[in-house]
Amino acid sequence: MAINKVEICGLDTSKLPMMTYERSRELLLKIKDGDENARETFIRENLRLVLSVIQRFSGRGEYMDDLFQVGCIGLIKAIDNFDLSHNVRFSTYAVPMIIGEVRRHLRDNNALRVSRSIRDTAYHALQTRARLMDETGQEPHISDIAKAMGLKEEDIAFALDAIQDPVSLFEPIYHDDGDAIYVMDQLKDDRTNDEDWLTHVAIQNGMDKLSEREQNIIRLRFFQGRTQMEVADEIGISQAQVSRLEKSALKHMRKYV
């Protein structure tokens, strides 16, 4: 069902009630005392929250009705686990729970399945990592985990990568009854900027104009920090030839950089 339609799971979403903080607090206190009617009312009045979350997962080939029902399961789990003693709005706690439930559904129904053996390796690696952290008090290197498990480092890395869900730049990481904060809002790299990117493009353009040998020399000298003597030994020519080819290549690149 398209997200812009009004009905989802037979509900007229335009008529879903809005939940205020005061109303939320009132019902949660009643739920804590075992009031089932308050629980049903609280679920019904938070369906708009579920709808706002599942809209972010549209366009993945899933029926919105299905995602809505899965989101409702996440909502119910959030209600069952919410602690009123914490000074946190229910929506702040519930949104990640709903997202987690939807992502699990999408992962479990993904056509790209991860084999059981790879999943077992990954989960064992996570347990080993936690144990090593407790023992040493610091983050273990993947080589430490591999050694403790008696496996190759690449096998551990592959298994851990396989169980990771791709994260959208539009994944919400905070929501408090207002505008959500997304992953893309938190991404920034002060080490690079548009000027650095343009410089990189220009250098690559200049490199493309060089011969294969010249490219190799420039790459070894300026990207890998090798000396002219080291470059000469690696490619089998004299240091004087490396120097001459390097100067020629740099002069040629300046025409394009």
Image (cartoon, grey):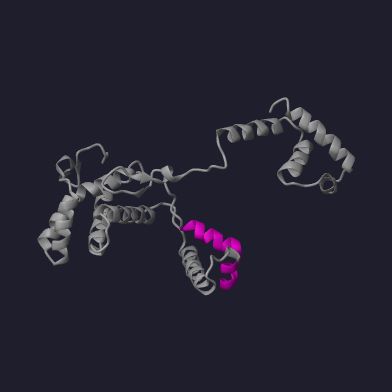
The residue positioned farthest toward the bottom in the image shown: 135
Q: Position of residue 158 (x, y in %)?
A: 54, 59
Which residue is rendered at x = 29% and y = 43% of the image? Answer: 55
Image quarter where the C terminus lies is top right
- Taking 131 as reference, is 172 left or right? left
Q: Position of residue 256 (x, y in %)?
A: 69, 26
Q: Is residue 41 magenta?
A: no
* Residue 253 image-quadrant placement: top right
Image quarter where the N terminus lies is top left
- One can see residue 236 in this view: yes
The boundaries of the magenta stretch are: 144-163
Q: Is residue 159 magenta?
A: yes
Please tell me whether the stretch drawn in magenta is mainly helix, strand or loop: helix
185 above or below 82? above
Which residue is rendered at x = 85% and y = 38% of the image? Answer: 243
- Taking 254 as reference, is 188 left or right? left
- One can see residue 63 in this view: no
